[in-house]
Image (spheres, rainbow, N blue to C red):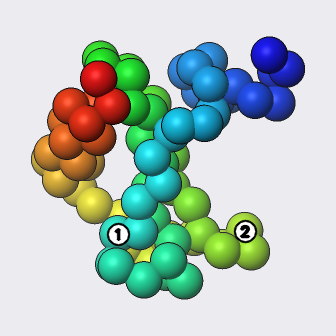
Amino acid sequence: MEDSELCLQCGHPFDPHAIISTTGDPVDGGIMLCPRVDCQCYSTWGLDGGEARRIPDRVEVEIIREQIQREGS
């Protein structure tokens, strides 16, 4: 596997990281989380290099992370 296929934060394969729109509209950007259990990697994203319109607080990120990791296991 090439380095470009790995997450720069956690080193796990980039695919299948979960890319989540935090407003329900992908145009507004969102967050990206690793589906591996116990991985704490986290980043935000926006279209064309912009910032996410809404960044969830720490508690909401953990709730989303738990759901993503439960589905990914």
Please rate how many residues cluster around mark 2, counting C-alpha atoms within 10 Å: few if below 14, some from 14 to 19, many from 20. few
Residue 12, image x and y in percent? 58, 20
The N terminus, quarter of image: top right
68 sits left or right of 2 in the view: left
For the point 28% across and 61% down, which residue is it? Answer: 56
Q: CA distance from mark 1 to mark 2?
A: 16 Å
Would residue 50 be visible to someone looking at this image?
Answer: yes
Residue 63, image x and y in percent? 15, 45
Comparing 37 with 22, the one in front is 37
- SS at badge 1: loop
For the point 35% across and 69% down, which residue is it? Answer: 22
Q: Which mark is residue 47?
A: none
Image quadrant of residue 70? top left
Residue that numbered label 2 is attached to: 49
Comparing 63 with 69, the one in front is 69
65 sits left or right of 34 in the view: left
Kind of residue at disc 2: Gly
Please rate how many residues cluster around mark 1, counting C-alpha atoms within 10 Å: few if below 14, some from 14 to 19, many from 20. some
For the point 60% across and 36% down, which residue is it? Answer: 15
Residue that numbered label 1 is attached to: 22
Q: Is residue 3 above or below residue 67?
A: above
